[in-house]
Amino acid sequence: MQSLAELQRGFAAALLDPALPTPTGLVGPDGEPSSRRFAVYRNNVMVGLTQTLKDAYPAVHRIVGSEFFHALARAYVVGHLPRSPMLFDYGAGLADFIDRFEPASVLPYLAEVARIERAWIEAYHSAEATPIGAAAFSQIDPDLLPDVSLVLHPSARIVSSRFPALTIWRMNVEDGTPAQIDLCAGGEDALVLRPKVEVEVRSIPAGSADFIRALATGRSVLAAFEEALVTNPGFDLAANLTDLVQVGAVIGLGTAGESLKP
């Protein structure tokens, strides 16, 4: 007799492979195996998960069209069943999957658009926090400035692209209008943030992604600045700090290496 775990694995496998028989022990009201009922259930699972991915990645869906997206989603679902009852969390690995999905290789920017959409979802569902104002910096002892670190808003996400993925994403959400894009125009970095109610997706200048990522690891402003200079020797520290505070990305100050509350 099969164990419960074996029965569950067989059930899950049959859900994703129409070639497999109806799972052992699955019967209808008449006590007989019910292949038709299971086929309906199998179809509902696939349709439901596909719709979940479509809702989570509207720009990707709009770029590739329904037929391609459904093929992409089906291929993803077959190897990635939900691991959480919270369906908003489903599809976290879709961008990496797109990178490996051969039919999508003609759209090299598609995975990076998907990463922006995933960052949007994560920011939307992140914890609440209250940003600080610029006045908080005036309270810092000048001698401690080299070691000051910033506590970033929990919703803050950085997406870097070697293509103009942010521009492409903007053209394919809400009222955006698709247009011709020069894929050789260079990459774009985006800051995804929910300082209040709405998620905001902002373009950030060269070096800012390195700067913010370094800050997120607890490094000092000075150390983060040095990281940014590697990418952009002309990185403007004062302007970037001002921007981060103004958009609500900073919720506290601390000292490098410490995880401090605001």
Image (tube, grey):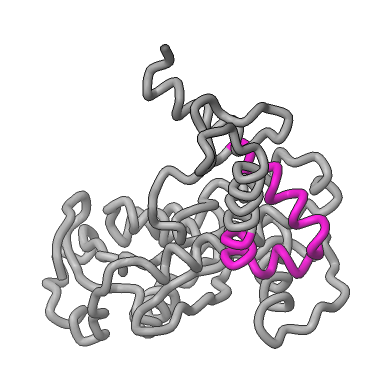
Q: Nearer the viewer, residue 16 or 186?
A: 16
Find residue 104 and report its horizontal and vertical position in percent: 80, 48
Find residue 168 and report its horizontal and vertical position in percent: 73, 70
Left or right for 174, reference 84: right
Q: Residue at x 67, y 78 (%)?
A: 173
The answer to whether residue 199 is magenta is no
Can residue 201 be seen here? The reply is yes
Above or below residue 190? Residue 257 is: above
Give the overall secondary structure of the magenta segment.
Answer: helix
Left or right for 238, reference 121: left
Q: Residue at x 57, y 74 (%)?
A: 203
Can residue 232 be seen here? The reply is no
Above or below residue 203? Residue 163 is: above
Q: Nearer the viewer, residue 194 or 77?
A: 77
On the image, which quarter does residue 177 sit in? bottom right
Above or below residue 259? Residue 198 is: below
Q: Nearer the viewer, residue 173 or 238?
A: 173
Residue closest to the far front = 30
Q: Residue at x 59, y 48 (%)?
A: 41
On the image, which quarter does residue 39 sit in? top right
Find residue 109 and report its horizontal and vertical position in percent: 74, 56
**Considering the image in quadrants, where does the C terminus appear?**
bottom left
Q: Residue at x 27, y 53 (%)?
A: 218
- Range covered by the magenta-colored residues: 51-79
Find residue 146 and report its horizontal and vertical position in percent: 24, 60
The answer to whether residue 57 is magenta is yes
Residue closest to the far top = 1
Left or right for 237, reference 149: right
**Considering the image in quadrants, where does the N terminus appear?**
top left
